[in-house]
Amino acid sequence: MTFELHVDVERWRGHLKTAAERLPGLVPVIKGNGYGLGRDRLAAESAALGADTVAVGVYAEVPEALEAFDGEVMVLGPWRPFLDGAAVEQALADPRVVHTVGRVADVAALAERAPGARVVVEGETSMARHGFDRHELAAAVAALGDLEVVGFAAHLPMTGSNLAEAESWAAALEASQLDTTTFFVSHLSPGELGQLRERRPGLTVRPRVGTSLWLGDLGALDVRAKVLDVHRISRGERVGYRQRAFPRDGYLLVISGGTSHGVGLEAPRSSAGVVQRGKTLAKGSLEAAGLMLSPFTVDGRQRWFAEPPHMPASQVLLPASATAPAVGDDVRCAVRFTTATFDRVVLD
């Protein structure tokens, strides 16, 4: 049983090179499932791009990153005094690791626990996730002790232009007593980064980029699933775990790729605008009626699930008017790469 990601490696690496050229000072973000491509692979590609630093999401990802990448490893998740375990201890002991701090109490605790540790001080942006309020920066400086500040960070939201907020935090950094001129930012376009550099020439602006780097050219990525079985089914015949009646004559396809691969698993999406809300409402109504569109394309059209996908495979409906594939054929699958797990990644 195979659920594979095929990568047009020449096209994909061409996109990576172009993106890196447009984003001087790039810090590639390597976290979670490695955007479907695998964290080790992204570490190697980051080195090939000439990156001196990569960013991971949490401390559990640090040991693998230190082994796969020779440069510095920045942890995007904030250090907290209650964090423990072998990965945390390794990170605290390795001078290549850069920690993120966003509370005065955490700065003081880290300074006591790991004197000389290298840190990025993060501001609390309109994301309201974590970080220092502007008025707390002086207290943060006072609590630093022997910690080495390698930069200031602003993790910005993903909607609209973030240039004004980024510039506001850049001004706060320049007015603070933090001993750094390096400004790490997330979610600014290349054009916005250029404008920020022009307006703040005294700062070294470094973008931290994940999705738009690794998944910026989806045309280079092709997900293929195998047809495991094809059954001719008559209208009214019951199928699957839940024994739903088949709505018409046609075929029941069993296709590799299920919930264990991330198929059918989606994070909530924001609905902006009347059209998008209408689509969300229509989709919800269909699902309430037991109709769920699958990510699999068969005979030129995206097809419906017969029932919710299983762990290793999915059952998909195909009308009699369509041309049924043969067992062993490949079908295309549209997945969310940030939640997908592949049996194999093939560099074509």
Image: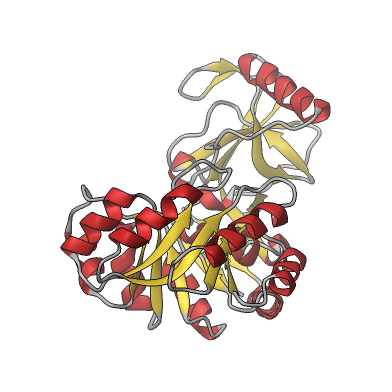
> Which residue is at a point 73% across and 70% down the rendered structure image?
199
For the question of whether residue 211 can be seen, the reply is yes
Locate residue 257, reporting x and y percent. Answer: 52, 46
Figure check: 105 above or below 73:
above
Figure check: 74 above or below 102:
below
Locate residue 243, reporting x and y percent. Answer: 51, 17
Figure check: 48 above or below 185:
below
Quarter assignment of residue 289: top right
Quarter assignment of residue 49: bottom right
Q: Is 68 in front, or is 272?
A: 272
Q: Is residue 297 left or right of residue 238?
A: right
Q: Is residue 293 left or right of residue 225?
A: right
Locate residue 288, reporting x and y percent. Answer: 62, 15
For the question of whether residue 101 can be seen, the reply is no
> Which residue is at a point 50% across and 25% down the rendered structure image?
240
> Which residue is at a point 74% across and 64% down the rendered structure image?
192
Q: Is residue 7 left or right of residue 279?
A: left
> Which residue is at a point 35% across and 49% down the rendered structure image?
103
Locate residue 33, reporting x and y percent. Answer: 45, 56
Quadrant housing the C terminus: bottom right
Figure check: 12 above or below 125:
below
Visual colour scheme: secondary structure
Image mark count: 0
Q: Is 110 in front, or is 140?
A: 140
